Amino acid sequence: MKMKMGEILMLGALCLFAASGSVQAHCEIPCGIYDDDMRFDMIDEHIDTIEKSVKKIAELSGTEGGAADANQLMRWVGSKEKHADQIREIITQYFMTQKLKTPDESDAGAFAAYTGQLVLMHKMLRTAMKCKQTVDLKNVEMLRKLAHDFKHAYGAAMKK
């Protein structure tokens, strides 16, 4: 059976597509599909999951349940780390890369608000890292506070 050039090219394109990596949930084009409120809700949900993970890790660490508890313990550790990484992804990929715009430095008020938002996001990134590294609920509460503060700082800046 002889293949035509177009069929060969189509087959090649399909092979390339099948071999490519996974598609990201959000592209960097102004599609208007995703919104800020959804991202803030996702951050809150990730924080809740980290908190539950930390509590379950503490609960399972003190038991004598053997392999079954060890397996669950590892799953909760993995969950905590995954959700901390997802918070960091939202902050960097969505807010820092796509949403936060650098204002004109001659507008002191806008530049101060921008700098304040950057500081809050950096603190969130560092605290998410601490949540990933530890099982201290103080880090979870700090992350929750920082997320709240950032949401309000971001909202106030967007209204201007």
Image (cartoon, grey):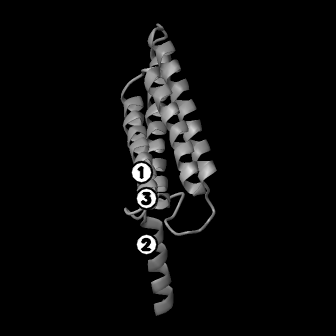
Q: Residue at x 61, y 43 (%)?
A: 41
Please state which of the two labelled residues, at mark 2 or mark 1, is closer to the viewer. 1
Amino acid under disc 1: Ala
The residue that disc 1 covers is 112
Q: Which mark is residue 16?
A: 2
Q: Earlier in the sequence, mark 2 or mark 1?
A: 2
Please state which of the two labelled residues, at mark 3 or mark 1, is closer to the viewer. 1
Residue 22's spot in the image, x, y percent? 47, 59
Disc 1 packing (10 Å; few <14; some 14–19; many ≥20): few
Asked whether 40 or 80 is in front, the reply is 40
Amino acid under disc 3: Thr
**Residue 2 can be seen, yes or no:** no
Q: CA separation, marks 3 and 2?
A: 28 Å
Residue 16's spot in the image, x, y percent? 43, 72
Disc 3 packing (10 Å; few <14; some 14–19; many ≥20): few
Above/below status of 3 relative to 42: below
Amino acid under disc 2: Leu
Above/below status of 53 relative to 69: below
Above/below status of 37 relative to 23: above
Q: Earlier in the sequence, mark 3 or mark 2?
A: 2
The residue that disc 3 covers is 97
Q: Determine whether the residue tagged by mark 1 lies in a helix, strand or loop.
A: helix
Q: Which mark is residue 75?
A: none
Q: Determine whether the residue tagged by mark 2 lies in a helix, strand or loop.
A: helix
Which quadrant of the rendered structure holds the C terminus?
bottom right
Q: Earlier in the sequence, mark 3 or mark 1?
A: 3
Q: CA separation, marks 2 and 1?
A: 47 Å
Q: Residue at x 50, y 82 (%)?
A: 10
Q: CA separation, marks 3 and 1?
A: 19 Å
Q: Residue at x 39, y 38 (%)?
A: 123
